[in-house]
Amino acid sequence: MVLAIDDENKMKFLWADIEAEVLPVRHVLSVDESIPLLESEEYRLIIIDRMMDGEHTFPNASEIDVGILLYKKIRQTNPAIPVIILTGYYEGDLGLGMEEVDSRFRMLEKSDTTDDIIFAIKALLHAVYGDEFPL
Protein backbone atom coordinates (compact mmCIF):
# COMPACT_ATOMS: atom_id res chain seq x y z
CA MET A 1 0.00 0.00 0.00
CA VAL A 2 1.06 3.59 -0.70
CA LEU A 3 0.55 6.31 1.90
CA ALA A 4 -0.03 9.64 0.15
CA ILE A 5 0.23 12.74 2.35
CA ASP A 6 -1.02 15.79 0.51
CA ASP A 7 -3.35 18.57 1.57
CA GLU A 8 -4.81 19.02 -1.93
CA ASN A 9 -7.95 17.06 -2.75
CA LYS A 10 -7.36 17.72 -6.45
CA MET A 11 -4.60 15.09 -6.34
CA LYS A 12 -7.25 12.38 -5.99
CA PHE A 13 -7.00 11.73 -9.73
CA LEU A 14 -3.30 10.92 -9.38
CA TRP A 15 -3.99 8.64 -6.41
CA ALA A 16 -6.64 6.81 -8.46
CA ASP A 17 -4.17 6.31 -11.33
CA ILE A 18 -1.49 5.04 -8.95
CA GLU A 19 -4.01 2.67 -7.43
CA ALA A 20 -5.05 1.41 -10.87
CA GLU A 21 -1.51 0.89 -12.13
CA VAL A 22 0.74 0.25 -9.12
CA LEU A 23 -0.62 -0.27 -5.58
CA PRO A 24 -3.60 0.67 -3.41
CA VAL A 25 -3.34 4.22 -2.04
CA ARG A 26 -4.35 5.58 1.34
CA HIS A 27 -4.59 9.36 1.16
CA VAL A 28 -4.47 11.67 4.16
CA LEU A 29 -4.76 15.45 4.05
CA SER A 30 -2.23 16.41 6.74
CA VAL A 31 1.10 15.57 8.28
CA ASP A 32 -0.56 15.38 11.68
CA GLU A 33 -3.03 12.80 10.36
CA SER A 34 -0.18 10.75 8.87
CA ILE A 35 1.90 10.29 12.03
CA PRO A 36 -0.30 7.65 13.72
CA LEU A 37 -0.52 5.75 10.42
CA LEU A 38 3.23 5.81 9.96
CA GLU A 39 3.65 4.47 13.48
CA SER A 40 1.03 1.71 13.22
CA GLU A 41 1.01 0.46 9.63
CA GLU A 42 3.52 -0.68 7.02
CA TYR A 43 3.65 0.87 3.57
CA ARG A 44 5.57 -0.04 0.42
CA LEU A 45 5.90 3.63 -0.59
CA ILE A 46 5.24 7.02 0.95
CA ILE A 47 4.42 10.07 -1.16
CA ILE A 48 4.67 13.44 0.56
CA ASP A 49 3.63 16.89 -0.61
CA ARG A 50 6.54 19.24 0.03
CA MET A 51 4.49 22.25 1.10
CA MET A 52 1.70 21.81 3.62
CA ASP A 53 0.68 22.63 7.16
CA GLY A 54 2.22 20.62 9.97
CA GLU A 55 1.31 22.81 12.89
CA HIS A 56 1.22 20.06 15.54
CA THR A 57 4.04 17.84 14.28
CA PHE A 58 6.40 20.67 13.30
CA PRO A 59 5.02 23.74 15.13
CA ASN A 60 7.80 26.18 14.23
CA ALA A 61 8.32 25.10 10.63
CA SER A 62 7.49 27.07 7.54
CA GLU A 63 4.95 25.30 5.29
CA ILE A 64 7.58 24.99 2.57
CA ASP A 65 9.79 22.87 4.86
CA VAL A 66 7.16 20.50 6.28
CA GLY A 67 7.50 17.79 3.60
CA ILE A 68 11.29 17.74 3.99
CA LEU A 69 10.97 17.56 7.78
CA LEU A 70 8.50 14.67 7.50
CA TYR A 71 10.89 12.88 5.12
CA LYS A 72 13.68 13.21 7.70
CA LYS A 73 11.38 11.96 10.48
CA ILE A 74 10.44 8.92 8.38
CA ARG A 75 14.11 8.21 7.69
CA GLN A 76 14.84 8.15 11.44
CA THR A 77 12.26 5.45 12.12
CA ASN A 78 12.14 3.61 8.79
CA PRO A 79 15.22 4.14 6.62
CA ALA A 80 14.26 1.36 4.18
CA ILE A 81 10.92 2.67 2.92
CA PRO A 82 10.97 4.42 -0.46
CA VAL A 83 9.78 8.04 -0.30
CA ILE A 84 8.76 10.44 -3.03
CA ILE A 85 8.29 14.14 -2.40
CA LEU A 86 5.90 15.76 -4.86
CA THR A 87 6.29 19.48 -5.19
CA GLY A 88 5.06 22.43 -7.14
CA TYR A 89 8.16 24.27 -5.90
CA TYR A 90 11.01 22.16 -7.26
CA GLU A 91 14.52 23.37 -6.54
CA GLY A 92 16.72 20.40 -7.41
CA ASP A 93 17.31 18.45 -4.23
CA LEU A 94 17.09 21.59 -2.07
CA GLY A 95 20.83 21.39 -1.46
CA LEU A 96 20.35 18.45 0.89
CA GLY A 97 22.08 15.90 -1.34
CA MET A 98 19.25 13.45 -0.61
CA GLU A 99 19.12 11.87 -4.05
CA GLU A 100 22.86 11.20 -4.01
CA VAL A 101 22.92 9.51 -0.62
CA ASP A 102 19.46 7.95 -0.52
CA SER A 103 18.62 5.66 -3.41
CA ARG A 104 15.16 5.19 -1.88
CA PHE A 105 14.20 8.83 -2.41
CA ARG A 106 12.93 10.82 -5.38
CA MET A 107 11.65 14.36 -5.73
CA LEU A 108 9.12 14.89 -8.51
CA GLU A 109 7.27 17.92 -9.77
CA LYS A 110 3.49 18.00 -9.55
CA SER A 111 3.53 19.51 -13.03
CA ASP A 112 4.97 16.27 -14.45
CA THR A 113 2.50 14.21 -16.42
CA THR A 114 0.68 11.42 -14.63
CA ASP A 115 2.47 8.93 -16.89
CA ASP A 116 5.86 10.37 -15.89
CA ILE A 117 4.99 10.24 -12.19
CA ILE A 118 3.73 6.65 -12.47
CA PHE A 119 6.86 5.63 -14.37
CA ALA A 120 9.06 7.23 -11.69
CA ILE A 121 7.10 5.40 -8.98
CA LYS A 122 7.45 2.08 -10.79
CA ALA A 123 11.17 2.66 -11.36
CA LEU A 124 11.74 3.48 -7.68
CA LEU A 125 9.75 0.45 -6.51
CA HIS A 126 11.64 -1.76 -8.96
CA ALA A 127 14.99 -0.39 -7.72
CA VAL A 128 14.02 -1.07 -4.10
CA TYR A 129 12.02 -4.30 -4.34
CA GLY A 130 13.29 -5.82 -7.59
CA ASP A 131 11.14 -7.99 -9.85
CA GLU A 132 8.19 -7.79 -7.45
CA PHE A 133 7.59 -4.47 -9.26
CA PRO A 134 8.50 -4.93 -12.94
CA LEU A 135 8.98 -1.90 -15.14
Image (cartoon, rainbow, N blue to C red):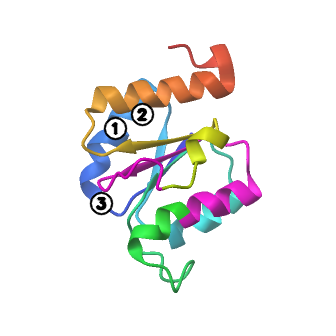
Q: Which label is found at residue 8? A: 3
Task: Kindly give the residue lying farthest to the bottom in the view shown.
Answer: 60
Q: Name the residue that disc number 1 marks.
A: 16
Circles 3 and 2, Cβ within 8 Å, touching? The answer is: no
Q: Quadrant of residue 57?
A: bottom right
Q: Quadrant of the N terminus?
A: top right
Which residue shows up at 29% across the image and 53% down it? 88
In the picture, measured across the screen, residue 69 lies left or right of residue 93, that is right
Q: What's the amino acid at mark 1?
A: Ala
Secondary element under disc 3, as helix, strand or loop, is: loop
**Magenta stretch contains residue 83:** yes
Q: What's the amino acid at mark 2?
A: Glu
Q: Name the residue that disc number 2 marks.
A: 19
Residue 48 placed where, x, y %? 47, 54
Circles 2 and 1, Cβ within 8 Å, touching? The answer is: yes
- Label 2: how many residues lie within 10 Å, few (<14), some (14-19) or many (20+)? some
In the picture, measured across the screen, residue 80 lies left or right of residue 88, that is right
- The number of numbered badges drawn on the structure is 3
